[in-house]
Image (cartoon, rainbow, N blue to C red):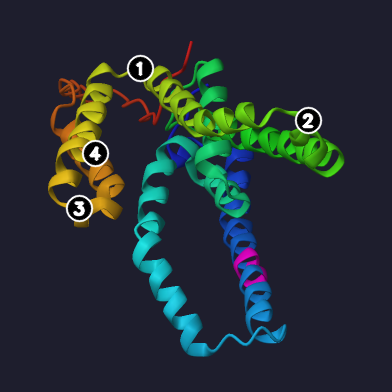
Amino acid sequence: MSTKTSADTPPGLAAFDRTTSIWGPITLALGLVISLAASLYAAFGSGIGITGAELVTAVVAVLATFGIIAVIEPVSYFPILGRSAMYQAFLIGNIANKLLPAAVMAQANLGERPGTRRAELIAGSAIIGAVLVHITTLILFVGVLGTWLVGMLPAPLVATARGYILPAVFGAVVLQSVMALKSRRTTIVAVITAALIVFVVVPLVPALTYYATALAVIITIAVSWVARAKMPPAPAASPGEAVPPMQISEPTR
């Protein structure tokens, strides 16, 4: 399946895009309002005694530490998820350790490169599946079994598992991303850039610790763009010859 320009978009996808443009911002806005209402009620309506100055101080501290993520995550995730799946992911949460791995794995298993309309639809379907599995396992293993199951495991086993869970998740994400991208040049640039940022730049300039991810993403994009394979210019069409419509993605076989 190939994704063409908007003029050649099938009616079904055009209607899907219109619905996404309307309901995506609405659902995100509702999620923001509900989240803020619950937080504000907990702070000022439950009698805890939090003052406005304390709230402002806490918000500023969080923004100073994690505000850069609000820029990094959309830039980093959009090429893989696409617009509709981005709305889903940012409304649900747990993107890096749950939704993104599910989307990347689904795209890789179906042989679709990120950045196409088919990849976007695959990512959205994978997110739905990940959420269903997550809710089911929460009900069974947390709500029903929960503490009993963890209490049955030896403490050393639990401590060891906790140390390997996060590296295992991100290792799977990296491997699936590399396999789905199928670009040796971009992979090498990303690995070298990340290694230099983490092991050279951050130790030399500790103030850049919270900006390491942003620097790695921006530098990788810039270097990959400069080092990309140069495509020869397309031959000009002869007079009277129809020019085929431009395609956003090529069919994946």
Of residues 209 and 147, which is closer to you in this image?
Answer: 147
Q: Amino acid at mark 3?
A: Pro
| Contact between labelled residues 2 and 3, with CB atoms less than 8 Å apart | no
Q: Amino acid at mark 4?
A: Val
Image location (x, y in percent) of residue 20: 59, 51
Upstream in the sequence, badge 1 or badge 3?
1
Upstream in the sequence, badge 4 or badge 1?
1
Q: Quadrant of residue 113?
A: top left
Which numbered tag is attached to residue 206? 3
Q: Give the residue displayed 20% in from the left and 28% down from the top.
A: 192
Residue where numbered disc 4 is placed: 198
Nearest to viewer (mark 1 / mark 3): 3
Upstream in the sequence, badge 4 or badge 2?
2
Upstream in the sequence, badge 3 or badge 4?
4
Secondary structure under tag 4 reads helix
- Classify mark 4: residues with Cα within 10 Å, few (<14), some (14-19) or many (20+): some
Image location (x, y in percent) of residue 9: 52, 37
Real-space Cα distance between discs 3 and 4?
A: 10 Å
Nearest to viewer (mark 2 / mark 1): 2
Real-space Cα distance between discs 4 and 2?
A: 38 Å
Q: Amino acid at mark 2?
A: Met
- Classify mark 1: residues with Cα within 10 Å, few (<14), some (14-19) or many (20+): few
Q: Quadrant of residue 188?
A: top left
Point out the residue furthest to the top here.
253
Residue where numbered disc 2 is placed: 152
Q: Give the residue displayed 56% in from the left and 55% down from the top.
A: 21
Relative placement, left or right, of 212 versus 103 is left
